[in-house]
Image (cartoon, rainbow, N blue to C red):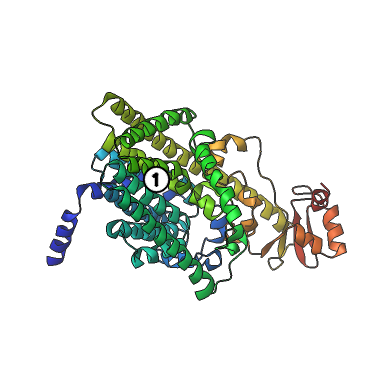
Amino acid sequence: MEVTKYFDKKIKKIPSNIKRAFLYTLVVGVLTHMFFLTNKFINHDDLLQLVHDMDFSSSGRWFLKYGNAISSNLSMSWVNGCLVIIYTGIMTAILIDIFQLKSKLSIFFASAMMITFPSNAALFPYSNSYDAYAFGGLLAFIGMYHFIKKENISLITISLTVLGLASYQIYFSFCFATIVVYYLVKLLRKEIKADKFVRNLLLTLINYLIAIISYVIITKYVLKIELTDYQNIDKMGSLSILDLIKSIPNTYVKFYEFFIKDSYYQFSYLKYLNVLFFIACLYLIIDAISKLKNKEIVLASLTLFLLPIFINLIYLMAPNSAIGLRMLQTYIVFYILSIVLVEYFANKIPAKIIAGWIICLSLFLSIFNFVVLANKAYTAYEIDKSNILSYTTRVLSRIENEDFYEADKKVYFIGNPDITNSFTQRYTSPDVLISTILDKKVVAHLYWKLYPIRYAAFPNEVDNMWYPDYSATNDELRQIIDDMPMYPAKGSIIEYDNEIYIKFRDYKTWANQ
C-alpha cells in the first residue's frame, strides 16, 4: 500500500502538460500506426533482421544491440512499434517541458507531429531496429534536456549523445537544432541577453563537438571497430573542408524541397498552404525581432538565417551518403518552432491572430496529410506483401516440379526479377514511393534469397548470382547461362554440377548495353 501511495504522489507531481504530451502521443500514435502494429510487413532489411540481435557495430551503431535487447531479437511489429510510440511520447514530453507549452492545442500539435511525421512511416517497416533507434534517440533527448537545465559542459550530455550516435546518428542533429531553437525563442521572448545567448550556444557547440570526437575515438580506437564502406561509413570523422563548403548550400536547397518543391504530400494544396505557413511564421518572428535591442536583433536574425543548416546537419555530417526520408526527423523542429510562435506571439494584434490561425490550419492539415500518407504506405506494403508471397511461391513451385529437384541442392537466383505490372504504379504513387522503398521491390534486393526459407518453408539453401559472380564462373557454366531463356520461359531452370540455377536476368545483354 505504501508503495502505491508513493507512486501516486510522484505521478500527481508531474505537470499536467507533460502528462498530456505523453498521452496524446500514445493515442495519436496507435491510431495512426495501428495498421502497421497489427500486421507484419517486410522490407529488404527486415528480411535479414527477422531474427537478429542488431549488432551492427560495423556501421558505427555499437550501442544498437542494447536498445534492441529491451524487447527481443525477433522483429515484432506490435511490441517494437509500441516501444517506439512510448519512447516518442517521452521525447515529446521533454520538448513540451523545454518550451513550456501549456495550451492543450499546442501540446496536441507537438505530440501529433512527433508521431505522425512521415519519417515514422518510413522507419516502422524496419521493425526489428526502429525501437532500438528510438531508444537511442530518447537517450540523446535526455542528454539535451540535461544541458538545457545545467547550461554547462556536461559529462551526462556528452555521454548520452555518444550513445545516441552509436544507435542512430539522426538524433544528433535533432537535439542540436532543438537547443538552437530553444535559445532563439528565449531571445525573442527577452528572457535571455545577447551575451548569455552566445555563451550558451558556444557551450552547446562544445558539448556536441566533444560528443562527436568521443564517439569517433571510442568507435575507431577504443572498440577498434572495422567500419563498413557502405554509405562511406568507413570515412567517419574524415569530413573534408571542401565537402563541408559544398554541403552548406545543399542544406538550404533541401529545406526548400522538403516544404515546397517535392513535398511529402498526398494533398498537393499543402505546398501552396506552406507558403502562407512560412509567411505567417516569418511575420511573427520578424515582429518579435523588431522589439529587441540591436545586439539581440543581429543574433536572432543570424540564427534564423542559419536555421536550415542546423535542421539539415545530416547533409553536413554525411555529404556522400544517400539521405532518405527516414533520416529527416529534424524537420519536426521547425514545426515545433511554429507551435511555440502561435502560443507566445500570436496575440493582441489582429494580424498576429490571423497569422496564428494560418499556422494552426497548416499544422492540422499537415498532420492529417501525414496520417493519410502513412496508411497509404502501409496499405501499399500489404499489397506488395501479397504479390511477393504469390510470386515467390510460383517460382519455388516451378523449381520443385523439375525432375532434377532435390531438397539438398543449392539454388542460385541469377539476377533479380521485375514483378511490376500495369497495376503496380496505381498503388505506388509518388507520395508513397518517396516514403518507402516500394519502387524497388524486395525481390530486386540482395536479401530476397532469404525469403524462400523464412517465409515460404523452402528447404534448399538459396544464393544470388550477381554480375561479378556470373563473370567469375567457368566458361562452360557461363555459356549455359547465356543460352538459357529468362524466367518464366521453359528452360529457365537448369541443373549444373548438382546445383540448381534459375535465370531472372540476361547478364550478357546487360553487360553490352
Q: Is residue 51 left or right of residue 389?
A: left
What's the residue at 68%, 52% (across, down)?
395
Q: Is residue 53 visible?
A: no
Q: Judge the density around disc 1: few (<14), some (14-19), many (≥20) Cα neighbours within 10 Å.
A: many
- SS under mark 1: helix
What's the residue at 50%, 70% (across, down)?
217
Q: Quadrant of the N terminus?
A: bottom left
Residue closer to the observer: 419 or 466? 466
Relative height, residue 318 to residue 370 (above, below): below
For the residue marked with disc 1, what is the amino acid?
Val
Coordinates of residue 286 in the picture (x, y in percent)? 36, 34
Coordinates of residue 223 in the picture (x, y in percent)? 51, 74
Residue closer to the observer: 119 or 439? 119
User: Which picture quadrant has residue 279?
Assistant: top left
Relative height, residue 202 to residue 251 (above, below): below
Q: Residue furthest front?
A: 294
Q: Is residue 135 left or right of residue 470?
A: left
Coordinates of residue 134 in the picture (x, y in percent)? 41, 56
Q: Residue furthest top?
A: 350
Coordinates of residue 449 in the picture (x, y in percent)? 64, 59
Q: Is residue 181 visible?
A: yes
Q: Which residue is under mark 1?
A: 333
Residue closer to the observer: 203 or 237? 203
